[in-house]
Amino acid sequence: MSKKAGRRSLKAATRLVTAGRDPDSNYGFVNPPVYHASTVLYPTAADQVAHRARYQYGRRGTPTSEALENALTELEGEGCAGTVLVPSGLAAISTALLSVLKAGDHLLVTDSAYRPTRTFCDGVLKRMGVETTYYDPLIGADVGRLFKANTRAVFVEAPGSQTFEMQDVPAIAKAAHDKDAVVLMDNTWATPLYFRAFEKGVDLSIQAGTKYIGGHSDIMFGTVSANPATFPALKETFNTMGLCAGPDDIYLALRGLRTMGVRLARHYESGLHIARWLTKRPEVLRVLHPALEDNPGHAIWKRDFSGASGLFSIVFKPTPERAVHAFMDALALFGMGFSWGGFESLVITFDCAEYRTATKWSPGGPTLRFHIGLEDVGDLIADLEGGFAAMAAAHY
Ligand SMILES: *Cc1c(COP(=O)(O)O)cnc(C)c1O
């Protein structure tokens, strides 16, 4: 293989390590420098008048931001025309939606979407004259029945936030495209490594870079990648809104991306191991993890995904809240806090019953969401055993 040719055939693991790198422009150094930048100086008045420069202004991009944009676009692969970098995952969602919608449009959003996505739709989008209808995440091709003459976009997230329902993205995308609507996906859980969004019919693929791209719980970051039809409007919206991510965060995201493959492989392996272990615990009613064979979404996961992240939920058999709290308080290796995707294990309680509108969430017992980090899996299980012991003690 020549040095430049043949990148299209590279596997994702290789792209993660090599994409977006340009040592020739950086005195041979492996990584690009972090450009802290606003003004770009023009050499002559004529250049300034003609805006003749490789870079125009800090907000419009630097070699640092371009390195990561190029890396992510190449990682998305066939069908992806470009990527924008924004200051959070939620900003990625709002920017992507604003780039495809206008007043008078109708939007279909999965009932299992990340809650702040709904808040954006029910607040800002509603005020701007966009109507949102929430749909059952398991709807599949029947989503076509919910289309109105003004339906412009369908938003999917698989698996669902907190509850991990699996969506049939190719079927939904086909139904949407039959009606000339675009498909946006929050692909934070699987990342482009485990779900090839563009190959499955997605037009705009969103990631909360705060999670696995960053990977170290030290940045807020988001990305939107788009196909050739939707990228120009995405880029224009991004520019017009004045969005730009900070250079240090972009650099940390680029740094995180290089090791995302090995980190995700471990999150996948340890997460599934612990999910399986939890299915055998007498205290646990259900484990919501699509890679488990008896999960209702398993067939779709197996067909469309090539891996799983370290994020899943469990439903306890009915038990008093104090016992759940005793379980959580006894854990030493699982921090209690929001977000996920870092190297560390986390646990939170959640309840979707109060805000879902198209479906009813009644799990049958208290619910916890786990993020399985990169610690030794035996240590994590020993910690969970301690939690279950504290839970049993709390019953008396
Ligand atoms: C965390 C998260 C987001 C939002 O990302 P922030 O960087 O926290 O704004 C969006 N979608 C999903 C699925 C998430 O888990």
Image (tube, rainbow, N blue to C red):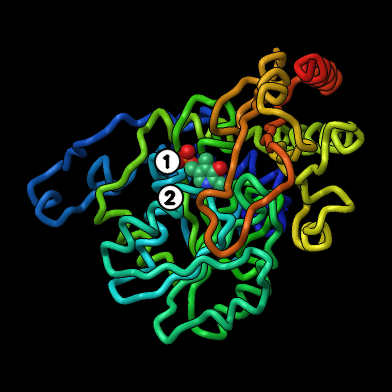
- Residue at mark 1: 88
- Residue at mark 2: 92
Viewer can see residue 83: yes
Disc 1 secondary structure class: loop
Disc 2 secondary structure class: helix
Residue drawn at x 60%, y 80% is: 175
* The quadrant where residue 14 appears: top right
Can you say whether 20 is above or below 137 in the image? above
Q: Position of residue 251 (x, y in %)?
A: 46, 31
Residue drawn at x 28%, y 69% is: 129
Graded by Cα atoms within 10 Å as few (under 14), some (14 to 19) or many (20 or more), the crowding at tag 1 reads some
Which image quarter holds the C terminus? top right
Asked if the residue at label 1 sits under 8 Å from ligand 1, the reply is: yes
The amino acid type of the residue labelled 2 equals Ala
Q: Are marks 1 and 2 in contact (CB under 8 Å)?
A: yes
How far apart in space, not on screen, are marks 1 and 2 (Cα)?
6 Å
Report the residue that reaches farthest toward the front: 396
Q: Position of residue 153 (x, y in %)?
A: 46, 72
